[in-house]
Image (cartoon, coloured by chain):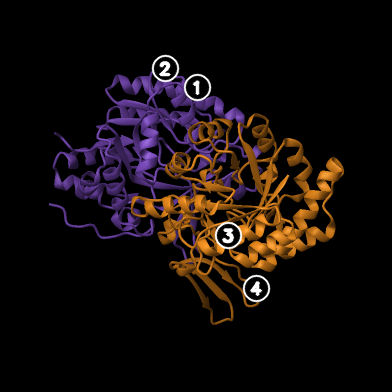
Amino acid sequence: MELVCPAGSLPALRAAVDAGADTVYTGLKDATNARHFAGLNFTPDSLARGIEYARSRGRRVLMAINTYPQPHGWGQWTTAVDRAADLGVDGVIIADAGVLGYAADRHPGLPRHLSVQASATSTEALQFYQEQFGIRRAVLPRVLSLTQVTRLAENSPVELEVFGFGSLCIMAEGRCLLSSYATGESPNTAGACSPAGHVRWEDLPDGGLETRLNGVLIDRFRPGEKAGYPTLCKGRFQVNGNKLGHILEEPTSLNSMELLPDLQAAGITAIKLEGRQRSPAYVAQITAVWRAAIDACRARGREFRPQEDWQRTLARLSEGSQTTLGAYHRAWQ
Amino acid sequence: MDTTPKLSLGPCQYFWPRTVVEAFYARVADSPVDIVYLGETVCAKRRELRPEDWIGLAGELAGTGKQAVLSTLTLIEARSEMGVVRRFCDNGEFLVEANDIAAVQLLHSRGLPFVTGPSVNIYNAATLRHYHRLGLQRWVMPVELGRDALQAILGDAALPQLQTEVFAHGRLPLAWSARCYTARYHDLPKDQCGLRCIENPEGMPVHTREGEHFLTINGIQTQSGRVTNLLPEWRDLSAAGADILRLSPLPEGTIQRLHAMRQALDGDPAALATVNADRAQTCNGYWYGQAGMTLTAQAEHP
C-alpha cells in the first residue's frame, strides 16, 4: 500500500519524503484547498522545489484543489488546476464536478483523484466520477465501517485511498455545514472548519477558560483542564435540556493502524495521513511510524500487529492524547 | 410571464409514526402546495413507510393535482441501502430527487430526468451545466449558498429551462454522519437503536452551556437549532432566480404556513405578516452571505 502524507510547507514536504512517504499531498496558499490557514501551504515556486526534491528521490507529489468554487472565485480554481499541470504534479485531488470537468477537458493527461470532500460512498458514486471525469482514484469518507470499505473495494472501478491517521471528521466530508452555520465559512466555501478568525479564548474569573466561535460558546474548561481548539463538533453541549457533554464527538484522533492487514487484503491502494496544518516535526514522526507499519504489514500480512511504541507515539501526537477507530469500527457509530 | 414562485414541501426529515405521516399528507393533499417530495432521506432504518407506501402516497397526491417527487437517501453507507434508492429510481412514473451522486448515476444511466436535493453540491455554473447535460431538470440550491451566489450561478449557467428551488423554511440540514447522535444520547449502539427517533417529532435540541438553542440532532443528521425562514423575502428570492420555495415539514404549523404563504403570494400583506410572526426565533444569514444562524433585517419590500 502506498503511504500518502501531508505537507503544508516545503520543510514538511522534505520531512515526509525523508521519513518514507511514497506520496506527499499539498495545496496552494489560497481557498482552493481544504487547509486554507494563515502561513500554510505553497507558492508555485516553493511547490516546484518540493516536486524536485520528491522526484529526485523517486517520490510523488499531489495537489489538493478540493473546495467548491463559487462563480466569483472560479478563475482562481481553474488557475490552480493549470498551475498543477504546469508544475507537473503527479495528480490533482478534486471534489467539485465543475473543476473535475475543467481538469479532464484541459489537462487530460493530469491524473485526477476524487477528494474525500466529494463524499463518494457507493459503487454507483465511484462509477459516476469515473465515467464522467476519468478519475484514477477516490479517497473514501471517514463514515464507512471496515466491512463497508471492504465491500466497496470488491466492486470499485477506481483505486481507493482511505484515512489512516489524524484529525477525525465525524460528518460526511463535503456535506458538513456546521462551520458556516456558525461563522459563514465552511470547508466547502472557505477551505476551513471553525476558522481561527472567529475563535475567542476567554479567561474566566475562577481561572478556567471559555472557547467561542463567532460568539457561540463551544466549550468551558475548569482551571487546569486541558483546553482544545473549538472545533464545532468536538465542543460540549447539552441535549434535550439534560445531557451535557461531547454529544457529537470527543477531541480524539483517528488511528486505523490495527486494520492495516484488512485494508491490504481488501485491495486498498493507499493510506492517507491527515495533517497539512501540522508541523514538519509532526509529519516526520507520523510518517516514520506509518512507513514502518506498512512495511511490516507487507512482510507479515495477517500476522501484522502494531508495535506498542508506534501506538504510543501516535497517541502522544493525537488530539486529547487519545485515538479511535472511528467509523471503521461499528461500535463507534 | 407569471413569475410568482411555486411552493414545494420538502421530504420530511423526521421520523414520524405511520398514522401521523398519513394524516399529515392527507392535509397536504388539501393544501395549496404545488410540489411534494416524499421519501426517507435521513436513515435507512426508518421504515414506518416502505418504498411502495411512498410511491402509493405519490400516486394519491398526484391525483389531487400536485407534482409528486420521490426523494432518495442522502448518506449511503451499505450496499443494501442502494436497494431503496434503486426502487425509487425505477418507479416508472414519478420524478426523483437525487440526494446523493449514486442516485444521479442511476437516473442518468436510465436516461431519466432528475432533481438534485440540497445535499448534492452544486456551487458553480460549470457543475450545474454538467448535471443539466445529464438530465438535471431542477436543482435545490445548497443551503449554505445565498443570493449573490445564486444570481451569479444562474447568470453564468444561462439555462432558461432549468428550475431553481430554494430551501425557504424549516430546520436546515447541516451535516450527516456515520454516527447516530440520537442513539448516542440514549447510550444505545446504532445497530440496536430501538428507532428512538420516533420519540422526537422535530429532533432533539442541542443547547450551548449558556442556553442557546444552537443545533438539533435527528438521528445521523445534524440540523440548525433555529428554523430558517426566507418566506418573508420571497420577492428577493424570486428576483434572484428562485422558481420554487421549499418548506421543510415540521410537526406544527406547516399546513397553515402553506395556506398563508399562498395568500401572501397572491398579494395579501396580512398573510405575509403571519408567515413572519415568529421571526425572532428564526435565521436567514446564509441568504445574505453571512453565518447561517444569524437573523438579518430584510430590505423593505414594495
Q: Nearer the viewer, mark 3 or mark 2?
A: 2
Q: Residues within 10 Å of mark 2 (few under 14, many from 20)?
A: few
The residues bearing labels 1 and 4 have C-alpha atoms spaced at a distance of: 52 Å
Amino acid on which the number 1 mark rests in the picture: Arg
Question: What label does residue A225 carry, if any?
Answer: 4
Q: Quadrant of the N terminus of chain A?
A: top right
Question: What label does residue A234 carry, if any?
Answer: 3
Mark 2, residue position = B92
B154 horizontally vs B45: left or right: left
Q: Quadrant of the C terminus of chain A?
A: top right
**Whether residue A275 is visible:** no
Q: Are marks 2 and 4 in contact (CB under 8 Å)?
A: no
Amino acid on which the number 2 mark rests in the picture: Gly
Measured along the vertical axis of the image, is residue A208 above or below residue B68?
below
Which chain shows up in purple? B
The residues bearing labels 4 and 3 have C-alpha atoms spaced at a distance of: 15 Å
Q: Secondary structure at mark 3?
A: helix
Amino acid on which the number 4 mark rests in the picture: Glu
Instruction: Residue at 56% x, 75% y: name it.
Output: A209
Colour of chain A in the image? orange
What chain does badge 4 belong to?
A: A
Instruction: Residue at 48% x, 26% y: name it.
Output: B106
